[in-house]
Image: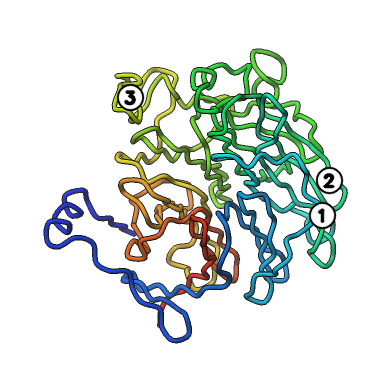
Amino acid sequence: MIRTSLTAASVSLLAACGGQAAAPDAAADGTITTRDGLKLTPVAEGLEFPWGMAALPNGDLLVTEREGRLRLISNNALVEAPVIGLPDDILVERQGGLLGIALDPDFETNRKLYLSYAKDMGETNTTAVISATLSTSASSLNDVTEIFLGEPRETAFHYGSRMGFLPDGSMIITLGDGYRYMQDAQDPDLLHGKIARIMPDGSLPSDNPFANGGGNPAVWSYGHRNVQGLAYHEASGILFAHEHGPKGGDELNIIEPGNNYGWPTITYGINYDGSIITDETEAPGLEQPAVKWVPSIAPSGMAVVVTEGFEDWSGDLLIGAMDGPQGQKLVRVDVGADGSVGETQDLLGDMQIGYRDVISTPDAIYVATNGLDATVYRVEKAE
């Protein structure tokens, strides 16, 4: 099935012919229909920098706000009181705050969930992951336990923080390079710029690539910049992750244990000030991306489509694009049952807003916009 997207030349032509069209207006019931034939229904408004979403079995949603709050959306309305019981050492600064969320595979029976955040350690900070039990009323967290700590840093940038599970029950945690520590991404002994694999209790699997030496035993893959999208593709058994490049060079990668994804030895991007990081875009032993975006789309959040009514998208990836030169939009990546990656399609671009996260459940697709006064929308096909 062929997917198409606007080329850079097409975008330039549109701009020359009068610029970007106005965003579509909302109907009387609040819904918005985009030029892609998609209907967006707001289910919660007024969120402050939402970062991660998780769908509960009863259809409610949990949403992290980077400002350090965990919110519940119930019956298509934002519950006023945040969920209580979060750690008191959340660093809310620059890109730091309360970030990723993932439900335990056995959530229906154990009500366990996992949260990642920027942990304030005084002179330093790091990415931390906790496990907790959600109360039956979904109003509080109990049994809060720290299960993972990243590498200490003195910056408040590039925390990674997406989480997911492999079929064997092990847990994947994405990490950033801390911005100033990009060279550490090539050192498997350090956790800057890595994807880690642990067990849900915080123990380390004995079959991790460096479990017997040669690197940090938690490391699953390395050479990453800032991984903010993670999705396991069940049909093919492939783990996909995407990461922010610098100025240009955002990547979608197929993650294999022990592999080196190149940052900053190779990259398709340059520094924000225009200076060159490296002239190399490929090198022996370093993985190439399945998809790259130059200029950037600023990707965040990713989901495999499993939603009823979107059978023609089944197994494809949806990726939020926040505010890059090619953003703001939702990107669909055509993925075959064997994990083969095809073309991409840009969606929701006429909304002129960025998307921080996207999730797909059997019943619905949800997107969370990026910003101070943000909205969670349910996405459907227009009649």
- Depicted 230 relative to depicted 158: above or below: below
Whole-angstrom CA distance, mark 3 to mark 2, is 43 Å
User: Going 52% across and 57% down the picture, which residue do you hit?
Assistant: 372
User: Going 55% across and 69% down the picture, which residue do you hit?
Assistant: 45
Q: Residue 227 location in percent, x, y?
A: 52, 37
Q: Nearer the viewer, residue 339 or 38?
A: 38
Which amino acid type corresponds to the residue marked 3 in the rendered image? Thr
Whole-angstrom CA distance, mark 3 to mark 1, is 45 Å
Which amino acid type corresponds to the residue marked 2 in the rendered image? Val
Q: Which residue is mark 3?
A: 281
Q: Which residue is mark 1?
A: 141
User: Going 55% across and 45% down the picture, which residue do you hit?
Assistant: 230
Q: Residue 49 location in percent, x, y?
A: 55, 54
**Quarter of the image with the N terminus in it:** bottom left
**Quarter of the image with the C terminus in it:** bottom left
- Depicted 131 relative to depicted 205: above or below: below
The answer to whether the residue labelled 1 contacts the one labelled 2, judged by CB atoms less than 8 Å apart, is: yes
Q: Which residue is mark 2?
A: 144
Mark 3 closeness class: few <14, some 14–19, many ≥20 residues within 10 Å: some
